[in-house]
Image (cartoon, rainbow, N blue to C red):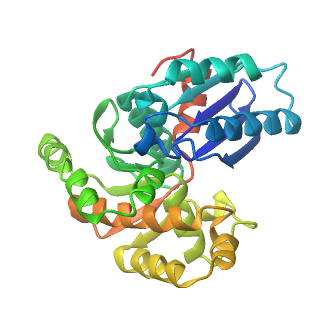
Amino acid sequence: MIAIDLGSNTIRFLAAAKNGRELWEAQFVVRTAENLVATGVICDAALERIAKAIGEAKKRFDFSNHTIAAVATQSFRQAKNQKEALKFLRDSYGVDFEVISPETEALLAARAACESAQKSALKPPFITIDVGGASSEVAYINGARFAYESLSIGVVTLTERGFDDCFLYNAVKRLEVFKEEIRAYTRPNALIATAGAPTTLAAIKLGLTYENYDKKIVNATSLDIAEIAHIKDELKSLDRAEQERLTGKDRGDLTITGAAILLRIMDALDYDRVIAFDEGLREGVLSRALNCGAI
């Protein structure tokens, strides 16, 4: 089984045997949401990057004997050329992407992050934050009990707006409804963050670079507000080359924006600490596929 998570910034691949044993993984920055705010469409350059990434993945791993479960998220949800873009990718490389709803995205990512957290001896309930490229999903999960809020802010789209702090503040205000919804639930034992920005911040805290990033080391790393703010300011002070040494190519500005989004969400939820986990939507997609499509 091969799971593919086509996000608004990164495309992530994960291959596993039928028993769930991981065989191979890879990810590529494709900036699916490039110019999406301004144009309303997924641009040709982004589609070419996605196609190139799929081609490169197929060179690195033999797809032929594996069923593919592929999902696309916010960029494709809002793109006016969604059908044409999906057809291009299907015709070019035979990958048929399912455009999932915000609720499905939040649930699959939350379940995967929750499972990883429990392996690290953390106990539910949890609130999870999935900081994406064009949207960010916040979810409460405790067994079958689930609530979520999808925020219209992401690292690519907010960066392209020139980092509009007022826009960020107003977008996060939607969490007031979420907080009211979960008020009667058992209080979460931890706030968990997944996706590229939180895990990159955690890696930097641990002294790792992009080249020696190791999710086994990064998982369960705790970050408080002061640490996130410090790393954000440190990244802003570095030149592009040094940023990319820590964050990866073309990810320095996105990590800075991601830190700002994370800080704003933490403040809105009244948490001063978050725990980073690498597992998220990609792993959730794989789990759903291995369990015969059950969400």
Pinpoint residue 183: horizontal percent, then vertical percent: 13, 46
What residue appears at the point 69 percent right and 66 percent down from the top-left corner?
A: 210
Pinpoint residue 228: horizontal percent, then vertical percent: 42, 74
Viewer-closest of 59 and 181: 59
Pinpoint residue 53: horizontal percent, then vertical percent: 74, 40
What residue appears at the point 76 percent right and 38 percent down from the top-left corner?
A: 52
Where is 255 relative to 18, above or below? below
What residue appears at the point 54 percent right and 40 percent down from the top-left corner?
A: 7
Quarter containing the C terminus: top left
Where is 233 relative to 151, above or below? below
Viewer-closest of 220 and 155: 155
Place residue 196 in its image quadrant: bottom right
Viewer-closest of 151 and 266: 151
287 with respect to 261 (left or right) = right
Pinpoint residue 171: horizontal percent, then vertical percent: 24, 51
Q: Judge whether residue 22 can be spotted in this image.
A: no
What residue appears at the point 68 percent right and 18 percent down from the top-left corner?
A: 90
Place residue 89 in its image quadrant: top right
Quarter containing the N terminus: top right
Q: Judge whether residue 268 can be spotted in this image.
A: yes
Where is 246 relative to 101, above or below? below
174 with respect to 56 (left or right) = left
Q: How many marks?
A: 0
Where is 28 relative to 3, above or below? below
Residue at the front extreme of this rendering = 39
75 with respect to 29 (left or right) = left
